Amino acid sequence: MKAAILYAYGETPKYGEFTDPVPQNPDQLLITVKAAAVKNLDKGIASGLHYSSNTTSFEPAVVGVDGVGVLEDGSRVYAAGIQGMISEKALINKNRFVRLPDQLDEVTAAALPNAVLGAAAALRYRAAVKAGDTVLINGATGVTGRIAVQIAKHYGAKKVIVTGRNAASLETLKSLGADEVISLKQGDDEILQCIRQIHQQTPIDAVIDYLWGHPAELILQALGGKGKFTHKIRFVTVGGMAGDTIQLSSATLRSSDIELIGSGIGSLSEEVMQKLFKEVLPEMFLLAAAGKLKIDTITAPLQDIETAWNQDIDGGKRLVIVI
């Protein structure tokens, strides 16, 4: 079969011939892959820098952790692969796939899951966002941030505030449900003033943070108290695009009712992971099929994987390889 093959960590996957996968036990199903997204996770694993990369030994392997395809009975499904999925065929677990709604195209279905899981886990299970809440999404112009805006509104958020550096992308978020935008290109004092003013007018219930670094420092500083009773805030960090560490004053946490937590694979229980896969993802597929959840994509054929892998793609779009 044809596949995107990684021959060494740190190299670009190449289009070539790879051994057809064969189910090794009754729990494995063969899937004919139709589309698979290229995500930061895939690139991190291929670089050898991701914690799941096996750097002690290496054999040529197909890249891509998940994808969309057709089972032998004709069912269209999304699934994580037992092995790589940017290939003509792959193996999946018979108990770990999601059927696609008839109206949902395969490119959108392949592009959504990683962003949905990165947004819904933080919003629903870590921040516990409920109807009527005010949510600040820090770094909302990326793929997952854009999905988070829409899911926050779906969960009933009364107000969604977004931050980012790309002015044009920030403005487009208004059409997806954002109520207020804060440019991170402003000076620190202006950013602090904006957040404090919004928080005073409409107390922020949850912060979903995809940046960490200095932008997170500013938000936490702005939400600090002044020696009076404060509004409870759940600050959930999901990513570190602006830096992996921050400086945080003890006084900020002592003067305010801020709950600082993370959202990622290690922070989620097995029960929550099952709910995300069995309940949340099917729900979001239905929303997308009805045109109520949108994601921007760019596509490339499998044979162009080497060029597409290194292509400079707008941060708000997801690359999907079509097989």
Image (cartoon, rainbow, N blue to C red):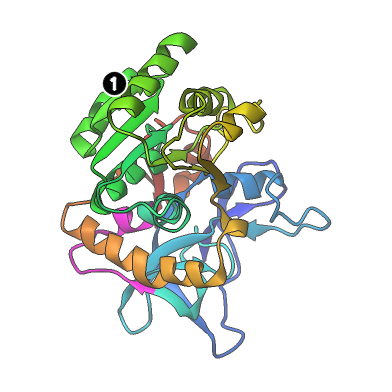
Query: Which element is circle 1 on?
Result: helix
Amino acid at the residue labelled 1: Ala
In the image as oriented, which residue stretches furthest toward the front?
228
Vertical comparison of 166 with 282: above or below? above
Which residue is at a point 53% across and 35% down the rendered structure image?
310
Locate the C terminus and report the quarter of the image it occupies: bottom left
- Would residue 298 be seen by someone viewing this image from the given angle? no
Vertical comparison of 79 with 50: above or below? below
Vertical comparison of 254 with 110: above or below? above
Q: Of residues 162 and 294, which is closer to you in this image?
A: 162
Q: Where is residue 150 in the image (x, y as percent from the top left)?
A: 27, 45
Left or right of residue 22, residue 148 in this image: left
Q: Position of residue 206 (x, y in %)?
A: 41, 42
Which residue is at a point 25% across and 24% down the rendered structure image?
171
Vertical comparison of 276 with 134: above or below? below
Which residue is at a point 29% across and 21% down the rendered structure image?
168
Q: Of residues 29 and 7, which is closer to you in this image?
A: 29
What is the quadrant of residue 181 in the picture? top left
Q: Position of residue 96 (x, y in %)?
A: 47, 76
What is the quadrant of residue 136 in the picture? top left
Within 10 angstroms of label 1, few (less than 14), some, or many (20 or more) residues?
few
Q: Where is residue 21 in the image (x, y as percent from the top left)?
A: 57, 74
Residue that mark 1 sits on: 168
User: For the magenta stretch, what is the residue range?
Assistant: 98-111
Q: Of residues 275 and 228, which is closer to you in this image?
A: 228
Left or right of residue 35, residue 43 in this image: right
119 inside magenta stretch: no
